[in-house]
Amino acid sequence: MKHLLKETDLSSTDLNRVFSLARELKKNRGKQTSSLLSGKTWVLIFSKESTRTRVSFEVGIRELGGNVIFLNKNDIQLGRGETVEDTARVLSRYAHGLVVRTYDHSDVERLASAGSIPVINALTDFLHPCQTLTDAFTAAERWAGPTGDLVESLKGRKIAFLGDTRFNMANSWMLTASMFGMKISLAGPTAYKPGEKINQLLQAGGRKIDYQVTTDPYEAVQGADIVYTDTWTSMGQESEAAARAIAMKPYTVTEKLFAAAKPDAFFMHCLPAHPGEEVVQAVLDNPRSIIFDEAENRLHVQKAIISHLTESK
Ligand code: CP
Ligand code: NVA
């Protein structure tokens, strides 16, 4: 059984397949109907809010011909203490796949190992693989054009990640950069530097990673092809918002900071954005900001991921 719990669950062959499928699905959207998931039901279980992930998965599963059930964790017995394992075993008797957004990364791992249907990580505190795989696809479609090699176009590119370098988006970008042969430079306050767990995962894969951590945002963006940021206060960290806003202030992506990257660099953000905090409105509106392509591509890439997991069972 194949799952997508972390980026490195996909081999380089899988990545090529997912990207070319996503390109094809995007090109043909609305032109042909799919019956890939005909008669199948996927269940979404979300313990956190979502706009893009929920809607793109619901639309995508329907476009593949399947049915969807959306559940908030508190709608089901899981919220009252039924075990993750029993939930996985029961849902595996009804459904054909699970998409899960939660806090603790071990919950998606436990669902995957106790159940017998594919599990897709739709964000945990540790990783957000659907987002960074989509981000990489979004930059690649610009660099490779309509027919070029998407995966190859990422090799050797540099991404600068600014702000909270200790949470899901930074962790996922470290893994993603390592998989595509990209360089990554992370700039943020020392108290929010990458943790042990992501370093262990990077080392476990034995992957070579050109990875630099600095407190200087200008050093990080030097020579960058992508300038990336995320909210300073992620879901579940609301009580720390004031302290985070003070600590991360030097890492706001201003026009001056964005201009210090390569002249043709893209600005990217997983969204939701907080204008005036991690990024100024003028950068969000810059012609080289590709934030809404990223949001749109969640649909195409996730359809490709589901197709790939379903086909390779
Ligand atoms: N980027 C992202 O995952 O957005 P949502 O929280 O709206 O799903
Ligand atoms: N780091 C953010 C990402 C939102 C898509 C969060 O976890 O809230």
Image (spheres, helix red, strand yellow):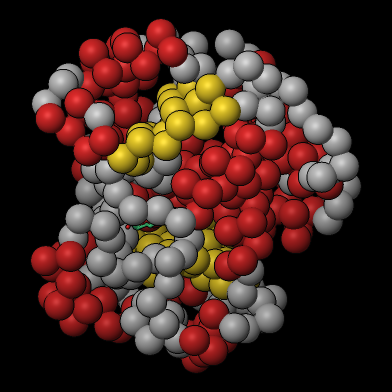
Q: Position of residue 209 (x, y in %)?
A: 46, 45
Q: Is residue 223 visible?
A: no
Q: From this view, report whether residue 295 is shown above or below residue 209.
A: below
Q: Which residue is depicted at the point 25% across and 29% down?
A: 76
Residue 311 visible to an observer of this rendering: yes
In the image, taking residue 4 as reference, residue 285 lies left or right, namely right
Tell me where residue 276 sits by quadrant. bottom left
Q: Is residue 66 left or right of residue 273?
A: right
For residue 46, above or below residue 225: above
Residue in the foreground of this view, choosing between 294 and 13: 294
229 left or right of 304?
A: left
> Residue placed at 23% from the left, 71% from the top?
189
The residue closer to the viewer here, 4 or 252, is 4
| Quadrant containing ligand 2 | bottom left
On the rendered structure, is 199 left or right of 268? left
Q: Nearer the viewer, residue 250 or 107?
A: 107
In the image, residue 150 above or below residue 51: above
Q: Quadrant of the C terminus?
A: top right
State the residue in front, 218 or 238: 238
Where's residue 171, x and y in %?
Answer: 36, 48
User: What residue is at 52 percent from the left and 31 percent from the top?
Assistant: 68
Q: Point out residue 199 in the picture as x, y percentages from the top left corner.
A: 30, 41
